[in-house]
Image (spheres, grey):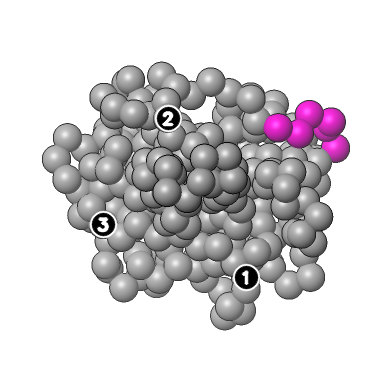
Amino acid sequence: MFDTFIKGSSVLTPNSIGLEKLPGNRLEDYFKEEKQKVDINVDLVGKRLGFTGFKRLPRETKLACYAIEQVLENSGTPIPKQKCNQTAVIIASTFSNLNPIVELYNDVEKFGADKLNPAIFPNTVINSISGYASIMFNITGPNITISQGKFSGLKALEFSLDLLQKQLVENVVICELNLQPPQLFHGLISRHVQKESIASLLLSTHPSKNTIIMDKNPKLIDIKAENKLNSSFAILELLYLLKQKTHIYLKKSSDANCFVCEDGDDIAR
C-alpha cells in the first residue's frame, strides 16, 4: 500500500501564525471571526535566506515563501545548501497573480507601454510564486501552480500524491494561497475570498521520527470537492485535522475528488 506522510505544516491567518492559533476545531469555525486579512511582516525572510530583492516581491510571493520556510523549519528539514531535485513545490491559488497584473496595468496607464518597468512583468506570470520559492529554497524538482477555482487546493493534493506515488520525487511542499483579489476585480469575479489564509504542508514518502501505526479501526475523514463551498481551503481543512494529531496518513480515494485521512496513534520509533 502506498502511503504519504504529512511531516510538517504551517499556517498564516489573520489570527496569527501556527496551528494553535486557528480558531475552533473545524474549518467552519475559521469563518466565524471578523478579521479578514493576513497582516504579517515577512520581509525578514529574504534577509535570513540572503535573497536580494525580496522586499520588492509581491505580497503573495512573500507570504508563500514565509509559509514554506515555516513548514520546512517545523518539519525539522533544513533548507538545503545544495540544489535538491527530490523535492517539488506546488502552489494552489486562483487569484495569486492578479495584484501584479493590476500594478502592471496601472503603470501602463500612467507612464505608457514604452516606459514599462520590465522588472514588474515576471510577477504577472501565474507560476512566478513557485518559481521564486524554488530559487529561494534551492529546490530544483518540479515547481507547479494549480489554478482551478474552488478546486485548486484539492487538485494540488491530487497532483502531489501522483508525483510521490510515481516516485518522481520524495517530498512535496504544498502552499495553498487564499488571498483577496484586487478591488478592481470584485465586480468581475463571481466568487472571491472572504477570509485570507496561507496554509502549507510537507508531504513525504518517508515516515518521520514519530511514525503512525494504523489502528485496527482507523478513523476515516473525507475531504470532498463536490458541492462544497470551501473546497478551495482543502489544505487548511487538513491543518484542522493536524490540530488533533501531529502526523496523519493521506491517500487518494477511488473518488477523484476525495482524499482520505487515516488517523492513528503516534509511536516513537
Image quadrant assignment for residue 222: bottom right
Please tell me which residue lies in front, 75 or 79: 79
Segment colored magenta:
32-37
Report if the CB atoms under discs 2 and 3 are less than 8 Å apart: no
In the image, residue 36 lies in the stretch drawn in magenta:
yes
Q: What is the three-letter code of the residue carrying label 1?
A: Cys
* Residue 258 - label: 1
In the structure shown, which secondary structural element does the residue marked by tag 2 occupy? helix
Residue 247 is left or right of residue 110, and the answer is left
Residue identified by numbered label 3: 141
Kindly indicate the quadrant of the structure image that contains residue 149.
bottom right
Look at the image and tell me whether residue 99 can be seen. no
**N-terminal-most mark, 1 or 3:** 3
Q: Secondary structure at mark 3?
A: loop
Q: Which residue is mark 2?
A: 56
Residue 48, x across and y down, in percent: 32, 21
Q: Residue 11: image x %, image y %?
A: 56, 36
Please state which of residues 181 and 161 is positioned toward the viewer in this rendering. Answer: 181
In space, the residues marked 2 and 1 are separated at their CA atoms by: 38 Å
Q: Earlier in the sequence, mark 2 or mark 1?
A: 2
Q: Main secondary structure of the magenta part?
A: loop
What residue is at 27 percent from the left and 33 percent from the top? 78
Point out the frontmost of discs 1 and 3. 3
Residue 229 horizontal/vertical position (percent): 78, 60
Residue plotted at (55% across, 62% down): 147
Identify the amino acid type marked 3. Answer: Gly
Q: CA distance from mark 1 to mark 3?
A: 26 Å
Q: Nearer the viewer, mark 2 or mark 1?
A: 2
Could you say whether the residue bearing mark 1 is in a helix, strand or loop? strand
**Residue 55 in the image: above or below residue 152:** above
Indicate the amino acid at tag 2.
Arg
Residue 259 picture location, percent across and down: 58, 66
